[in-house]
Image (cartoon, rainbow, N blue to C red):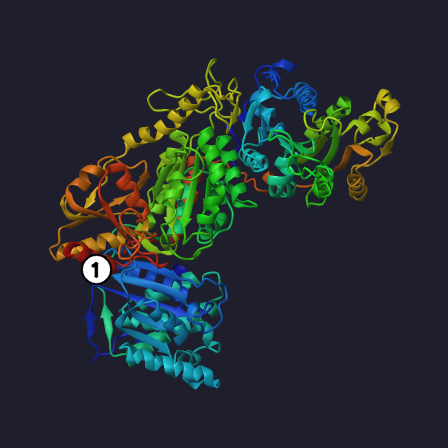
Amino acid sequence: MSQSETVTPTAIAGARRPRANKTVTEIPQHVVEIISDSGEGAQRCGQSLGAVAARMGNGVWTVEIIPAEIRPPARSVAGASGNRIRLGARKVTNGGDETDLAVAFNEQVLLGRVRAGELKPGATILLESKWRDETDPRITSAYAETFEQLEAAGYRVIEIAMERECKKVVPDARKGKNMFALGMLCSIYSLDVELAEEQIGLTFRKKSREIIDSNIALLHAGYTWAEAHLDFKYQIPAAPAKEAQIVVNGNTALALGVLASGMEICAMYPITPATSASHYLADVFEKVGGVVHQAEDEIAACAFAIGASYAGKCTVTITSGPGYSLKQEAIGLAVMAEIPLVVVNVQRGGPSTGQPTKVEQGDLLTTMFGSHGDAPKVVLAASTVEDCFYSVITARKIAETFNMVVVVLTDASLATAQTPFPRPVFNEAWVAPPVDQSPVPPGTRPYDWDPDTGIARRVIPGQPGGMHTITGLAHDRDSHVAYDPDINEEGLRARSLKLAALQKTLKQPTVFGDESGELLLVGWGSTRGAIEEAVERMRAEGRKVSSLHLRFLQPLPPGINDIMNRFGKVMTIETNWSDRPEDQIIDEHNRRYSALAMLLRARYLVDVDCWTQVRGAPIKPGTICQVIRERMDG
Amino acid sequence: MATAASHCLLRLYEERHELEDYQSGVPRWCTGCGDNAILAAVQRLCRDEQLRPEKTVFISGIGCSSRFPHYMKTYGFHGIHGRALPVAEGVRMARKDLHVFVNTGDGDCCSIGAAHWVHAIRYNMNMTVFLHDNQIYGLTKMQASPTSPRGLRSNTTPRGSFLEAMQPLTVTLGVQNVSFVAQAVDWIPELLYDIVSAAYRHRGFSFIRIVQRCPEWLPSLFEPWLHDPERVRLLHHEDGIQVSPALARVYRNQEHHNPVDIDRAREIASCIDPIPVGILYRNPQVPCYEDLRATDHLRTTEFIKNGLEAEFDKFTVWPSA
């Protein structure tokens, strides 16, 4: 950070003083988005804004807006690329409701966001106005038409000749507009410009001094312009953190978790939206003596991981839905042979190729029950970015303690959401023990299942006296292929008991809100922040609603039944499909419930309802509030 | 990557392993099955090389041949159909101190696992791979395999198979990084042993296609070759297999072939009749993937901690002083 302190251009330093006649409105939170065609740097602008606000002590939740195509046509409705940042006075746990303020580099990408219902009624829009003066009449008319539509719809559209302003500072303005926008936003949200300069220094640390300087000049130009021309300015109270925080997205947290977990091999195959975790891991894993192996396909990645785990080094394979489907047979082998394995599924929209870049919680049942036959495995779901880090560590521990497959579920929303969490403190217990190469006592059997827990001590290649052949066929305690009915049931029993043994070690989950009431919302995974915020808002209105968020889905922790029984109604909130009761053909006998609702109903014989939304975007707290009102009043 | 701690331990006493130290159970293959000959050759190899049973792993997929690890008194991994190679790669990546062998059949390797086969050649990890090629699916009761001769009547091709047989040797020799390719037949045990031995000694991905009889489903397929030694061509070379005088008297169809000559190796590979037997290609210079990926660091707690803290530093927002 020190390098950037020397690069402040002094000529326009005076611009940092706010305009005297401007009133600063204090607000508790705001959602801002910066959108452009891809390649115009909106993401970099958004990330920098988030970083600066986080350093000032604001709560921050940043989400990438990613078009499905690498290079969608310029100025296309589906091509919005950028960032959505929620700033708050307190810790921000989710992306919040609709956008309050948008910066758009063209009106078409903005239109896409408006049509998707992402902008709050009356939201402020800072729109690049250069399209008015284009020579192509199709562009000018499209721009004018959209502008009128937006105004008519009640948005406050402020046209800004961003590119023209940038040209006063740099020759190639298209590339620098993002830092101009960052400057404007620093002014609007009363953020520290010096911190923004430092951030630019960090962002461009691999670039030349000229590039850093010109970006800082653009930052100041934007700041100065906004100070002089905009009639509004906000202040979101900030409480600077007292402890060190790290700011990463869920996939980076996941990769850091792999580094910390004691695992040293990750086998993967590229798949959206999981790949960015492997990108980062590929860059840094070798620094702690690890290897990322990009296999020829998903099945090979899983088999490779199983081979390495079998040889004594618990291994992780990271994938997303379609890849998970391909791995299922190999996962069954690991279950049958009792080889520890960590599988991460960064869920995306399905089925089939579905919506690769969009969030969905559609894989819960397939991870729990997938693979043919009875294949018990542990399933846990990260519910926060921080959780993405710790879940991998927990997963490796469980995998090695119980010789089981542990699936960690995250999703596209957590993968790309960036938010601060306390810097983890290194724990020696995270490191894997050395591979056991001690001689095996005579008479040791490779599957000496404990009669109570089903757990057997694993014998690893290299251990003298322990030689045996593991097999995916039904086998006895000596790992000999066995078709005997009793032996078959003995193996099934042992593998199943291990889940119960793990369940005995789990704590009862904590209720958010009162321990009893009228309505209990139950969720899992990335919906946590939104559900809890909605519950908080509704409780402030006096409603007797609480929520329960499950980290372990298989096995389910103890005490859930008791908790549910203390509420009048129980309902899950999930990002997966459930039949809509209002559809004419749907009734109690054919309605397909959401994944968690189905599980809770089956296990606890409780009439659990569900409300789900699968719109390719995180569920908003405001939407959940509406659902709560309807359910409690209706 | 750190090697297993045991890799560094000295052997404090010499222990002589006999053939029976590698034998486990009675093979359940049919009488006359070529797999028996392969098992005998491999057990002899282990004994002659004095491989420590606990440091030796046989990995297989599914099929008759994939029963192989059960009959070895070493570590074994009888996995799922087609995936023996990626499992073996994972074992090798994690543990360079282990001797890794793979047993795979023509269905396992050339059909359901074909993608892994191609890439395993390219990775060139140090392991010895036996393709037990009997040109038929045996365990599932006689269906045509990719290496079945055209016109073969089977349960899935009752009026004869439609396609020309795949030639595993030409496929293998066509892939970048190929480093060892040989062919053996189960009915000449002496050469089978010599070839298995040469394959084991090659550091890299040693691929041996073993033409193997299936007495149950194709009892007469190889009769013409068995009865006419002229239809087997022995490849011999000072740097390859040397043919004993006794064998040379029977098998007079011979070719002096230098295993560095990949062009000639490819020509030989495409020859179906006579069946070439010997080492077609060997290149010890091809790097092994596990060596390319090796880091020299011992993964101590301190080392991991330092690496992790350095990464945390990159993303840390420190509290204001």
**Circle 1 sits in a helix, a strand or a loop, which is it?**
helix
**Residue at image location 41% in from the left, 81% down from the top:** A142
Left or right? Give the position of A296 relative to B233: left
Quarter of the picture containing the N terminus of chain A is bottom left
Q: Provide the chain ID for the residue under circle 1.
A: A
Can residue B313 be seen by looking at this rendering? Answer: no
The foreground one among B199 and A5 is B199
From this view, report whether residue A401 is shown above or below residue B44: below
Query: Which kind of residue does numbered mark 1 sit on?
Result: Gln
Residue at which label 1 appears: A626
Left or right? Give the position of A355 relative to A578: right
The percent position of residue B220, horizontal first and vertical second, equals: 76, 27
Can residue A1 be seen by looking at this rendering? Answer: yes
**Residue at image location 51% in from the left, 22% down from the top:** A481
Quarter of the picture containing the C terminus of chain A is bottom left
Left or right? Give the position of A30 relative to B164: left
